[in-house]
Image: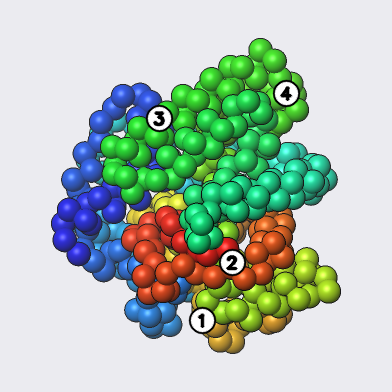
């Protein structure tokens, strides 16, 4: 890979995950160190179509914990399933605190991006406890009718957006708007602002527009969310922010609320959009899956195991947030020292033969591998897992029923998958609706 493309890919990765919250403070960052990463260090982000590259599977089977060549720091890649669970499940031995990474880079100030994924107990426990009630099945079931209505509305919009040949971009007109609108619903974004919200979600998603563009989109969305928090302070609505303000308004700051809302947007948008787009691609490439849902007497019953297997097989969040060893220890027979960084490859772990036979094959009829790591594991396991699944289970049956003749508008090999992105996916999926 050439240096400029490596630089922009890594900067995009880092921008998205780690540095998004620094911009608001107007602090610059020296990203040049990241351009020096050798190709081997990028292995956990490389794919061949929908599959992790074979090299990482071979590495996992040979050396489930291996050294990653990243200059200036000791980084371990954990690609085995058992080892991944050990790391993710032990928050006492491994920290998520971003300050650890900062100490390893040329950034000298103690930048702390905040958000659930970057903090440890007791802060993590306190902040996560605020959100948990809104993500229980009981509370989420109140969203079910809205999720179904949003999916129906967006299918109608998809049809409207198609050209005279029935060609349309599935990502722009369905895969992205559905989770964006569900998050509006969840947070309590007023109806009249939903178009604008959706618009900046798309811009934010479009980080391939360049690092500058993504910084801009991220800080713009933070400003928007901050404004939303202020507005909800004045007049708390029925959504998550209104609920948090009514119940914990005195003990949570606007900054923390903005961080939580931003975490929900970052965590719930791109991930679900990628699952919708790549899941649709799986169905269009192998018509059997499409027809199995479309022709089922009970499409929802067929869609549920399809979605579970899809989550495992695609594992679109390719690596967990970095973990930082707090002490010397052994993982998978390898000695890790306090201060080392550990990158867990969720996508390689979810193909580990220790999880079951033929894990490289997509097979929705296999006994459900509910213990897959597509949502992570341990105290940082995805808080929106059920919500994400609800969206996917609602969308696929409706899609195949509404457009039974839908097909790809390009040859599969013409599709452009994101390169070196933590959340794997396509930025565009051209389809013909009929
Ligand atoms: C199918 C879609 C989704 C996938 C594949 C996914 C995946 C993940 C993964 C792998 C993690 C753990 C990362 C780690 O341990 O380092 C995570 C955490 C998180 N996700 Fe999701 N996610 C999805 C949907 C959502 C949705 C819909 C929301 C919210 C609306 C959400 C919000 C979050 C938050 C806030 C965290 C941080 C949790 C914590 O650190 O305690 N995610 N997600």
Q: Calculate the distance from the C-alpha at mark 4 to the C-alpha at mark 2.
A: 41 Å
Indicate which disc, 3 or 4, sits on the residue closer to the N terminus: 3
Give residue 73's mark: none
Indicate which disc, 1 or 2, sits on the residue closer to the N terminus: 1
Q: Nearer the viewer, residue 84 or 33?
A: 33
Q: Calculate the distance from the C-alpha at mark 3 to the C-alpha at mark 4.
A: 24 Å
* Residue receiving disc 4: 237
Mark 3 nearby-residue class (10 Å; few <14, some 14–19, many ≥20): many
Residue 99 percent location from the top left of the image = 38, 39
Identified at 65% across, 16% down, the residue is 233
In the image, which is nearer the foreground, mark 1 or mark 2?
2
Q: Is mark 3 within 8 Å of ligand 1?
A: no
* Residue receiving disc 3: 219
Residue 281 percent location from the top left of the image = 53, 69
Identified at 43% across, 82% down, the residue is 61
Q: Are marks 1 and 4 in contact (CB under 8 Å)?
A: no
Q: Calculate the distance from the C-alpha at mark 1 to the C-alpha at mark 2.
A: 32 Å
In which quadrant of the rendered image does the N terminus lie? bottom left
Q: Nearer the viewer, residue 118 or 160?
A: 160
Q: Are marks 4 and 2 in contact (CB under 8 Å)?
A: no
* Residue receiving disc 1: 360
């Amino acid at each position: 890979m050439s240096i400029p493309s490596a630089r922009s890919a890594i900067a995009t990765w880092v921008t998205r995950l780690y540095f998004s919250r620094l911009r608001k403070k107007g602090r610059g960052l020296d990203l040049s160190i990241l351009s020096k990463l050798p190709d081997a260090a990028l292995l956990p982000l490389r794919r061949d179509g929908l599959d992790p590259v074979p090299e990482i599977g071979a590495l996992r089977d040979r050396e489930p914990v291996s050294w990653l060549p990243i200059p200036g720091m000791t980084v371990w890649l954990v690609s085995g399933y058992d080892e991944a669970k050990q790391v993710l499940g032990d928050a006492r031995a491994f920290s998520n605190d971003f300050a650890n990474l900062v100490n390893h880079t040329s950034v000298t100030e103690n930048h702390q991006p905040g958000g659930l994924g970057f903090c440890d107990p007791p802060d993590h426990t306190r902040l996560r406890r605020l959100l948990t009630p809104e993500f229980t099945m009981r509370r989420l079931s109140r969203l079910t009718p809205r999720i179904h209505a949003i999916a129906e509305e967006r299918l109608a919009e998809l049809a409207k957006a198609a050209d005279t040949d029935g060609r349309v971009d599935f990502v722009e007109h369905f895969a992205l708007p559905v989770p964006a609108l569900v998050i509006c619903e969840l947070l309590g974004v007023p109806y009249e602002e939903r178009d604008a919200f959706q618009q900046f979600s798309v811009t934010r998603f479009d980080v391939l527009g360049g690092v500058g563009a993504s910084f801009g989109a991220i800080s713009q969305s933070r400003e928007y969310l901050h404004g939303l928090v202020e507005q909800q302070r004045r007049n708390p609505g029925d959504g998550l922010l209104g609920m948090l303000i009514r119940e914990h308004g005195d003990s949570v700051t606007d900054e923390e609320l903005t961080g939580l809302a931003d975490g929900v947007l970052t965590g719930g948008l791109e991930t679900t959009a990628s699952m919708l787009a790549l899941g649709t691609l799986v169905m269009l490439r192998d018509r059997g899956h499409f027809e199995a849902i479309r022709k089922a007497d009970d499409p929802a019953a067929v869609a549920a195991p399809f979605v579970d297997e899809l989550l495992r097989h695609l594992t679109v969040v390719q690596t967990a947030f970095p973990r930082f060893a707090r002490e010397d220890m052994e993982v998978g027979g390898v000695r890790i020292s306090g201060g080392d960084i550990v990158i867990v490859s969720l996508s390689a772990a979810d193909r580990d033969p220790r999880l079951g036979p033929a894990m490289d094959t997509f097979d929705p009829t296999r006994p459900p591998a509910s213990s897959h790591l597509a949502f992570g594991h341990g105290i940082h396991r995805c808080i929106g897992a059920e919500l994400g699944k609800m969206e996917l289970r609602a969308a696929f049956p409706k899609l195949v029923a509404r457009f039974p003749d839908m097909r790809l508008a390009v040859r599969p090999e013409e599709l452009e998958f994101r390169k070196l992105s933590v959340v794997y996916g396509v930025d565009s999926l051209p389809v013909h609706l009929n």
